[in-house]
């Protein structure tokens, strides 16, 4: 099976779960927002995408605090993309795997002092204000900023739904 086909199948899986969860269970009928969330889940299946922000030396940035410093050092679209990624990163961990936050915010890490919800909301807002050709995505980013907690809760529900679909699968494993 080629990569594009499996990515497409994975996107359709997450899209269906997100649509069911957000529309039917939470009453959020916002197709562009739901599409964004499905794309986020599909993209973040790959660890390289979760940790895609790099500093000028090419070192992978694994903490929000490091990403914030890098975002402030950039201008224009590169700055927008780092802020968008910070929003995605914080939303993903807060919503899908909140039990991981304890490790991500360990006392030995810079993120110990970072409030993931506040920084995610702030990052999405900043990204939404940086001009781009895709004003439609900027509108979605602004909604993510305003509805961060609801979207994080919805992502948790999406996870519960995919785990419910195959009770024999080990916890956290998606079966297509």
Image (cartoon, rainbow, N blue to C red):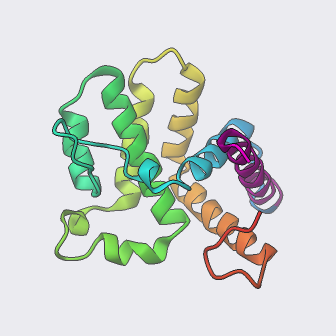
Q: Is residue 46 above or below residue 141?
A: below
Q: Residue furthest top?
A: 133
Q: Residue at x 71, y 51 (%)?
A: 10
Residue 21 in which image quadrant: bottom right
Of 159 and 9, nearer the camera is: 9
Picture coordinates of residue 154 (x, y %)? 65, 61
Direction from residue 106 to residue 146 in the image, left or right: right
Picture coordinates of residue 71 (x, y %)? 26, 37
Q: Residue at x 37, y 55 (%)?
A: 118
Residue 2 in which image quadrant: top right
Q: Can I make out residue 175 in this image? A: yes
Direction from residue 176 to residue 90 in the image, left or right: left
Magenta segment, which residues?
A: 1-24
Direction from residue 90 to residue 17 in the image, left or right: right
Quadrant placement of the C terminus:
bottom right
Chief SS of the magenta region: helix
Labels in figure, total: 0
Q: Can I make out residue 126 in this image? A: no
Q: Is residue 65 above or below residue 136?
A: below
Picture coordinates of residue 26 (x, y %)? 74, 60
Q: Is residue 165 magenta?
A: no
Picture coordinates of residue 15 (x, y %)? 74, 49
Q: Residue at x 16, y 39 (%)?
A: 57
Q: Residue at x 66, y 48 (%)?
A: 38
Q: Is residue 18 magenta?
A: yes
């Amino acid at each position: 099976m080629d990569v594009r086909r499996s990515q497409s199948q994975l996107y359709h899986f997450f899209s269906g779960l997100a649509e069911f969860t957000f529309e039917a269970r939470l009453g959020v009928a916002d197709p562009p927002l739901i599409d964004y969330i499905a794309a986020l889940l599909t993209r973040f299946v790959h660890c390289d995408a979760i940790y895609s922000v790099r500093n000028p030396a090419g070192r992978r940035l694994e903490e929000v605090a490091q990403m914030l410093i890098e975002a402030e050092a950039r201008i224009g679209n590169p700055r927008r993309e780092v802020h968008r990624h910070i929003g995605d990163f914080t939303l993903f961990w807060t919503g899908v795997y909140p039990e991981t936050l304890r490790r991500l915010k360990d006392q030995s890490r810079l993120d110990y002092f970072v409030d993931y919800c506040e920084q995610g909301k702030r990052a999405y807002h900043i990204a939404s204000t940086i001009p781009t050709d895709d004003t439609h995505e900027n509108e979605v980013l602004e909604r993510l900023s305003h509805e961060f907690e609801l979207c994080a809760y919805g992502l948790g529900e999406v996870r519960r739904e995919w785990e419910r679909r195959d009770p024999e699968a080990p916890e956290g494993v998606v079966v297509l």
